[in-house]
Image (cartoon, grey):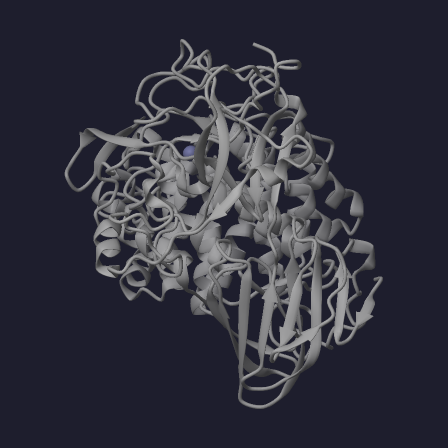
């Protein structure tokens, strides 16, 4: 590994597999079995992972992320049994010891996977207890041969097993074990995976979902192998890899969730195969999909339900299941590869797409989130989007049955990956958010690092170390791909920090109680031009992409007072092209931040009132401290609403009168930029894309008289 040593810093470029230190090199020697000094790491012959997940409960999310998790706990995920028949304990086949009953497919495990982890990251006793009830039932349902849960799945595919729902339940059990150490879990999983290993190879190539998603169980087999050392688990993983969808040779299935979940499989199998071609295959799959269908901002791709040739523009949608599964894939690949670009990709989706998939109060979601989406109505948009029926409006009900359950793991998994252990006894700040992490480091001492930040709404991150005694360990800080000039101080003293973006800065020193690291990741405005989408542009500031602020009119069309269904319609124009500074497009924007509102109670009242019709539309009112606006500080509130965004941009724009909704009710197709407009120049406000539920994130560029097109 090439390292530049800079005054106490080592700047490490993105690690390639070949550069990583082998087991027993610079890694601390194992003290018990496969354990390093602190945490379970990969057991030989698996290749070492660059980073290691910390035990659940090690990280306490704070700030806006905690607020999102609390909204989730008080909203759909926390209360889903009220409205989902798949989450009712009484008659669920997942809750019965003999596996008889109803609703034994993916929905319950989808929900429980995030629900349990939500309890663990929030230390919410009620959720932990409730999820434990389900897990106890599952653990009591094992047959002598090792199969468990709903018996219908044993013959679900024309008499052969449908193995997909069990993949998700295994993830539930992994988290439960990481949290509780319950001694029933490992023997139970071993017995089931022995049964799985007894199945013929064709069982892993059967069925639409199982065949494509079986990489999930390779990860599970490795997880269990690292804890038990049972070698049959590696045989099983190989057998799955050899028989399932061949993701190593490319992308052969174009279902959005299948891609988001399946593309990573070679990257996971790389740990066992030890050949870098597998890691490269995961990256190539990502590039293939994004090169064709990810040609707009937000971090997702056009897959509404499937990717379709010719449907690549920003009015195509990405399913909420796709958002959370893609994020999970990126989190896994960060740990495996040590390449920080996966964390950048995760943040892009988390900040810019996930919040807009949900109502601000987490009591409804929609199926499809698009980069350009000027109305969230319940009408059918097919065939302009692949799926027929209601796809855009917000509902908590089974109209969005998979997403309704599966959205649960998005933020909890994210919160679990903020900090990672490193195999050399250190800590890595992988995804930035306010949090406290308590972990064993160096010689085994326990330290707590408190991270104070409003990131991504501010560029400064303060880390305070609490340690019982001085301890030497490396602290790795991810430098995002967009950050050219990171700055750092230790205890107020600047430390030279060279090295480009997409790297980990390593602070190797003896840390003592009270040490403070201040990291600044200066953000700049950047204009991206999308050559494959008519030279339209999008605007970034650090990891945030910005959308036109469009006034929202929320119209309830169904549901109950507790669980309303909403359409959202625009109250202001959305058909703007941007007037850009030709020489330096990034100079076309002015950053504005709210001044704190004197009445914090007012902002809380708004926060609690959910998506009631918001007064004032998209005027310039809510940014800049206009009286009557309820502008929140970002630290503890929901930054993902029109009225509470902590940062915005002002831009010059002109309306394009011919740009309208098309016959299918979608934003009209983009035309080649630059485009012509005879309208007057106006000042418009752009807000973070994640807060913009109605959104124009891909803008035509207004041209001069000589070069513009109609
Ligand atoms: Zn879904």
Query: Quarter of the picture for ligand 1?
Result: top left
Q: Which image quadrant is residue 570 in?
A: top left
Vertical position of residue 477 compared to residue 469: above or below: above
Name which residue lies at 26% across and 62% down. 126
Between 569 and 101, the one lying in front of the other is 569
Q: How many marks?
A: 0
Q: Would you say 4 lies left or right of 263 here?
A: right
Residue furthest right in the image: 2
Between 115 and 678, the one lying in front of the other is 678
Rendered-image quadrant of the N terminus: bottom right
Vertical position of residue 612 compared to residue 62: above or below: above
Q: Which image quadrant is residue 261 in?
A: top right
Vertical position of residue 538 compared to residue 440: above or below: above
The percent coordinates of residue 88 (x first, y second) are 24, 45
Rendered-image quadrant of the C terminus: top right
Q: Is residue 690 visible?
A: yes
Q: Which image quadrant is residue 91 in?
A: top left
Q: Would you say 694 lies left or right of 283 here?
A: left
Q: Would you say 364 lies left or right of 452 here?
A: left
The percent coordinates of residue 189 (x first, y second) are 50, 56
The percent coordinates of residue 34 (x first, y second) are 67, 70
Between 332 and 69, the one lying in front of the other is 69
Residue furthest bottom in the image: 469
Residue furthest left in the image: 561
Name which residue lies at 42% across and 68% down. 180
Q: Is residue 213 visible?
A: no
Name which residue lies at 42% across and 14% down. 660
The percent coordinates of residue 192 (x first, y second) are 50, 51
């Amino acid at each position: 590994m090439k390292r530049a040593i800079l005054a106490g810093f080592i700047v490490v470029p993105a690690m390639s597999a070949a550069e990583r230190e082998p087991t027993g090199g610079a890694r601390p020697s194992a003290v018990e079995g496969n354990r390093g000094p602190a945490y379970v790491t990969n057991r030989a012959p698996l290749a070492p992972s660059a980073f290691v997940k910390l035990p659940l409960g090690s990280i306490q999310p704070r700030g806006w992320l905690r607020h999102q998790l609390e909204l989730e706990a008080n909203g759909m995920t926390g209360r889903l049994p009220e409205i989902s028949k798949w989450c009712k304990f009484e008659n669920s086949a997942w809750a019965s010891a003999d596996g008889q009953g109803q609703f034994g497919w993916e929905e319950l495990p989808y929900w429980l996977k995030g629900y349990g982890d939500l309890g663990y990251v929030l230390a919410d006793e009620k959720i932990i207890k409730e999820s434990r009830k389900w897990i106890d039932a599952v653990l009591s349902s094992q047959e002598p041969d090792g199969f468990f849960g709903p018996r219908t799945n044993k013959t679900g595919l024309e008499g052969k097993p449908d193995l997909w729902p069990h993949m998700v339940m295994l993830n539930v059990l992994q988290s439960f074990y990481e949290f509780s150490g319950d001694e029933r879990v490992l023997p139970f999983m071993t017995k089931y995976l022995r049964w799985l290993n007894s199945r013929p190879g064709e069982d892993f190539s059967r069925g639409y979902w199982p065949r494509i998603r079986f990489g999930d169980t390779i990860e599970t087999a490795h997880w269990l192998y690292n804890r038990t050392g049972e070698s049959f688990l590696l045989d099983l993983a190989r057998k799955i890899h050899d028989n399932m969808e061949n993701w190593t040779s490319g992308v052969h299935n174009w279902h959005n969730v299948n891609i988001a979940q399946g593309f990573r499989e070679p990257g996971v199998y790389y740990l066992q195969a030890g050949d870098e071609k597998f890691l490269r295959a995961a990256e190539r799959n990502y590039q293939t999909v994004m090169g064709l269908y990810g040609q707009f901002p937000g971090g997702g791709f056009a897959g509404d339900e499937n990717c379709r040739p010719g449907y690549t523009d920003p009015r195509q949608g990405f399913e909420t299941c796709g958002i959370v599964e893609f994020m999970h894939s990126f989190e896994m690949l960060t740990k495996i590869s040590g390449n920080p670009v996966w964390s950048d990709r995760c943040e892009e989706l988390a900040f810019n797409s996930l919040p807009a998939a949900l109502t601000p109060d987490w009591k409804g979601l929609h199926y499809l989130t698009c980069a350009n989406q000027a109305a969230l109505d319940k009408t059918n948009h097919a065939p302009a989007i692949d799926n027929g029926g209601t796809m855009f409006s917000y509902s908590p009900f089974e109209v969005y049955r998979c997403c309704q359950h599966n959205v649960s793991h998005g933020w909890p998994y994210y919160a679990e990956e903020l900090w990672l252990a490193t195999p050399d006894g250190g800590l890595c700040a992988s995804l930035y958010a306010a949090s406290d992490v308590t972990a064993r480091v160096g010689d085994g001492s326990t330290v707590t690092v408190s991270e104070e930040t409003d990131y991504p709404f501010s560029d400064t991150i303060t880390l305070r170390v609490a340690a019982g005694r001085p301890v030497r360990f490396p602290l790795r800080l991810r430098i995002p791909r967009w950050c050219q000039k990171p700055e750092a101080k230790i205890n107020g003293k600047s430390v030279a920090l060279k090295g480009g973006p997409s790297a980990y800065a390593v602070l190797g020193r003896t840390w003592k109680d009270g040490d403070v690291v201040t990291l600044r990741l200066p953000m700049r405005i950047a204009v991206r031009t999308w050559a494959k989408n008519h030279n339209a542009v999008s605007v970034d500031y650090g990891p945030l992409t910005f959308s036109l602020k469009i006034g929202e009119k929320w119209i309830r069309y169904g549901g109950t007072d507790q669980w309303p269904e909403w359409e959202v319609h625009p109250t202001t124009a959305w058909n703007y092209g941007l007037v850009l500074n030709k020489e330096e497009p990034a100079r076309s924007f002015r950053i504005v931040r709210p001044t704190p509102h004197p009445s914090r109670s007012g902002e809380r009242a708004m926060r609690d009132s959910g998506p009631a019709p918001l007064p004032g539309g998209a005027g310039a009112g809510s940014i800049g401290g206009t009286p009557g606006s309820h502008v929140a500080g970002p630290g503890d509130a929901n930054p993902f609403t029109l009225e509470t965004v902590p940062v915005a941009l002002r831009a010059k724009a002109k309306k394009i009168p011919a740009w309208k909704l098309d016959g299918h009710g979608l934003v009209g197709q983009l035309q080649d930029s630059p485009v012509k407009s005879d309208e007057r120049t106006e000042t418009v406000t752009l807000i973070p894309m994640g807060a913009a539920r109605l959104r124009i994130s891909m803008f035509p560029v207004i041209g001069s008289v000589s070069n513009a097109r109609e």
